[in-house]
Amino acid sequence: MRVALICSAASMFLALGANAQMIVDPSKPLTNKPEETEVFPPQAALPKVVQSPKAFDAPPSDAIVLFDGKNLDEWVSSRGKTPAKWTLADGAFTVNKQAGDMETKRNFTNYQLHIEYRIPANITGEGQSRGNSGVFLAATNGKAGGYEIQVLDGYNNENKTYVNGMVGSIYKEAIPLANPARKAGEWNVYDIVWTAPTFNTDGTVKTKARVTAFLNGVLVQNNFEVQGETNYIGKHDYVKHGPAPIKLQAHGDKSEPVSYRNVWLREL
Ligand code: MG
């Protein structure tokens, strides 16, 4: 709707792709006047006004709140889509490793996700067995089960593991651009932009998925083009899917479980 308005009411704009990036019409020659590159869309096509909280710890006004500290109503156990069994306490929920992964009831395509996590202060173990969880940005029926951005103890690079499997990585694909992970016991904040892949009718990939991610306000993934679902072994590949839940990982290692809080999402 917004794209249509832009195109019909203001012919100097072009809408490019799903993100509707606007640019000045390249077919018109420029004559060096500043206003030629100044964009004034009609009122209805202006960026949506959204109330933003003063502190960055509450959802914006148009967010879908997936967890506000009170209940797990938006979540199900991935196994059999039964009621979520992770532990709810003190405004957070904690991985229940016996219960397995947990995922949203709702399906999403493109979105901005905010999620906070905490590696417990008493964490033990090492490498991938130290505070391992993860956010599957689309939970699929493929054998890898989706696309994971990693959650793992990574404070000060003290936990040795493969760099494309550390916190902030697109697991086994993309090394994070920085490591702003906080000490075990402190809360970390992920803000993630997910652009879902698109598929042709024959199942082949039309456009690959993309991820931009900030960890504690620091850019860790910059519009990274995902090569496929997060296979633990071997090449990553795509299996055609549509809108999908977001899934949180109950990793099978013996270390103390990770907690999450303040989960919200804005659809794009
Ligand atoms: Mg993980």
Image (cartoon, rainbow, N blue to C red):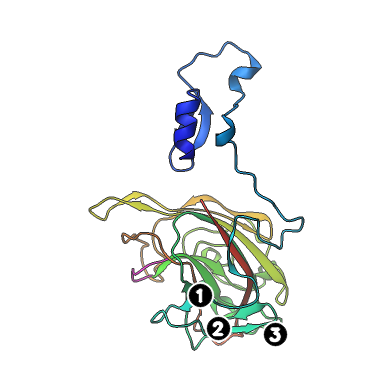
The three-letter amino acid code for the residue at tag 1 is Trp
- Residue 133 placement, left or right of 197: right
Q: Is residue 72 visible?
A: yes
Q: Nearer the viewer, mark 2 or mark 1?
A: 1
Q: Farthest residue toward the right?
A: 54
Query: Label 2 is placed on what type of residue?
Result: Trp
Quarter-wise, where is residue 180 in the image? bottom right
| Mark nearer the N terminus (2 vs 1) | 1
> Hey, what amino acid is under mark 3?
Asn
Quadrant into which the N terminus falls: top left
Q: CA distance from mark 2 to mark 1?
A: 10 Å
Q: What residue appears at the point 51 percent right and 80 percent down from the top-left corner?
A: 250
Numbered label tally: 3
Q: Which residues are magenta?
A: 139-144
Position above or below: 240 against 250? above
Q: Residues within 10 Å of mark 3 (few under 14, many from 20)?
A: few
**Crowd band around label 1 with a 10 angstrom C-alpha radius: few (<14), some (14–19), many (20+):** many
Residue picked out by circle 1: 75
Task: Residue 53: give x, y in percent of width and height.
Answer: 73, 56
Closer mark to the observer between disc 3 and disc 2: 2
Residue placed under numbered mark 2 in the picture: 86
Residue 122 is marked as: 3
What is the CA distance from the residue labelled 3 to the residue labelled 1? 27 Å
Mark-to-mark CA distance, 3 and 2 = 19 Å
Which residue is rendered at x = 60% and y = 79% of the image? 130
